[in-house]
Image: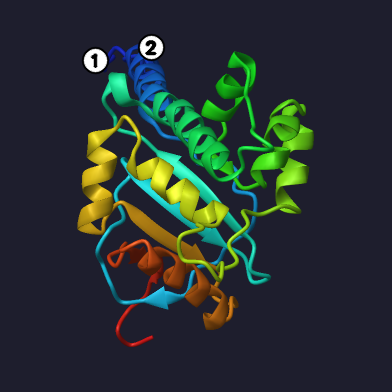
Amino acid sequence: MGKVKIKKKETRIDMTAMSDVTVLLLTFFMLTSTFLQKEPITVITPPSVSEEKVPDANLLSVLVSPEGKVFLEVLGSKDSTLKSETVRADLLKNMASEYNKMHPSNPVKFTAKQIDAFSKQNAFGVPMNQMAKWLDMPVDERDKALEKAGIPINMNENPDTPNEFQMWIRAAYNSMNPELQETMVKGRGIAIKADQTTPYSVVNVVMDNLQTMKMNKFSLMTALKTEEE
């Protein structure tokens, strides 16, 4: 009796559909992801067991280096009308107004191009009398100059004369974004991010400046660790 030959089936799997799905997923994640922007200083936050998350919108972050240099980052709302770029542009205009009130003999002015450049700048921190020159720099030179700068924050003897750090805080509070103002009042709108090697005395200067302005509620950014650590 002859053997029955079984017809061999092709074992190749058509991956066309899977490739299409992969490309679609990759495109989706690229369009919806929020990329981390470069910060002017490298900050390794101290560990803690707190699991409370810092908001990713309507936030004013204060970066503090071990040397005591202070920088600011501002995030607006996820709403298209109050997005970060719009809030930053309004912030610079408010800060210019605050600064010119205190320095009428040496006022600062910004062009539309400079305001647009500032709105796209994630972190900033140069004295106001150098801001226009800094904004006119190419982006790569601007980043290098920022590392060596910092917002003036020394406490003034006269409590009625705010320093530039306090002016920025006031300008942010008076910005066009009511949601940022609300989070600042509730204590979730201001976050201090300092390196774990930064002396407490340096961070304390920032906290003293905030408390002088009646900003008694703020967050301290830390890295999550287990209770055993």
Q: If the image is split into quadrants, where does the C terminus sit?
A: bottom left
Residue at 41% x, 19% y is 27
Return the residue found at the far front: 105
Q: Nearer the viewer, mark 2 or mark 1?
A: 2
Residue at 48% x, 49% y is 167
Q: Nearer the viewer, residue 210 or 68?
A: 210
Query: To which residue does mark 1 refer?
Result: 4
Query: To which residue does mark 2 refer?
Result: 16
Q: Is residue 150 left or right of residue 32?
A: right
Q: Nearer the viewer, residue 50 or 202?
A: 202
Q: Is residue 119 left or right of residue 3?
A: right
The part of the image, by quadrant, that contains residue 25 is top left
Instruction: Tell me residue 30's x, y (percent).
Output: 43, 25
Residue 220 appears anywhere in the view:
no
The part of the image, by quadrant, that contains residue 139 is top right
Residue 76, compared with residue 216, is above or below; it is: above
